[in-house]
Image: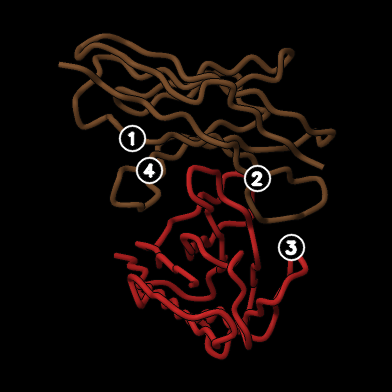
Chain colours: A red, B brown
Amino acid sequence: SQTIHQWPATLVQPVGSPLSLECTVEGTSNPNLYWYRQAAGRGLQLLFYSVGIGQISSEVPQNLSASRPQDRQFILSSKKLLLSDSGFYLCAWSVGSGSRDEQFFGPGTRLTVL
Amino acid sequence: AQKITQTQPGMFVQEKEAVTLDCTYDTSDQSYGLFWYKQPSSGEMIFLIYQGSYDEQNATEGRYSLNFQKARKSANLVISASQLGDSAMYFCAMRAMDTGRRALTFGSGTRLQVQP
């Protein structure tokens, strides 16, 4: 069965510090991968998605970046965090190509920038 | 562009009763999919049910059913026989397929509280 891992689970970082969040998927090949952010009490905002190694699409211009160095690994990074980067970061995967292609989410990382 | 609107920030329901969570959507695409996810306090997003724009029958998954009214662009979630464990945030989402974009657009969510 497929499993998605995210770490760390929680993170407290000072403004201006770097960030690296990691997401890995097990039990599937060539998944579509996604990074979402959820602000407190809000819905999910798509940040990046990837359909293959090295292929990254950015949805929202900001100080975050994403990379996919391996088929089942997706990394979210920042060189200098802002207060507005605080939130709940969710990684998701899917493997379909039609309209169904439901996404399955990881446990999330709760980031607080102080 | 796609947009999902969930007009109920919070809902209460008595245990064992049915509840309907509203969702309306806006898209110019002819082919699209509609999804509902549940987010308990732990934060994980749990996929509940899917409806395709060309599906003629309303989707059902156990106690969940989707009341799809295409002309009204609504995709309401119906939970029958509510249980205490149903208390959570519920999000409606859409994927519009005409442009080939794979990502989901989410609504702002509805917080459901099931009372004993």
Mark 2 or mark 4, which is nearer the start of the sequence? 4
Q: Position of residue B100 (x, y in %)?
A: 77, 54
Chain letter, disc 3 residue: A
Task: Find disc 3 in the rendering and name its residue.
Answer: A59
Q: CA distance from mark 1 to mark 3?
A: 28 Å
Q: Considering only vertical position in the picture, is B3 above or below B67?
A: below
In the displayed structure, does residue A91 sit left or right of residue B53?
Answer: left
Q: Residue A70 appears at what percent x and percent y?
A: 53, 88
Contact, mark 2 vs mark 3 (Cβ under 8 Å): no
Residue at 53% over, 37% down = B35
Q: Is residue A112 above or below residue B74?
A: below
Is there CB contact under 8 Å for labels 1 and 4? yes
Are dots 3 and 4 in contact, CB under 8 Å? Answer: no
Which of the numbered marks, if any, corresponds to residue B39? 4
Q: Taking A56 as reference, is B94 above or below it?
A: above
Please say if the residues under marks 1 and 3 sit with CB atoms less than 8 Å apart.
no
* Discs 1 and 3 lie in a common subunit: no
Q: Secondary structure at mark 4?
A: strand
The residue that label 1 is drawn on is: B88
Q: Nearer the viewer, residue A31 or B20?
A: B20
> Which circle, 2 or 1, is nearer the viewer?
1
Hey, which residue is sitting farthest left in the picture?
B116
Near mark 2 (Cα within 10 A), the count class, few <14, some 14-19 or many ≥20, is: many
Q: Quadrant of residue A10?
A: bottom left
**What amino acid is labelled 3 in the image?**
Glu
Please determine if labels 2 and 1 lie on a single subunit: yes
SS for callout 2: strand
Chain letter of the residue beneath label 2 in the structure image = B
Amino acid identity at mark 1:
Ala
Q: Residue type at mark 2: give it.
A: Thr
Provide the residue designation for mark 2: B105
Say what amino acid the circle numbered 4 marks. Answer: Gln
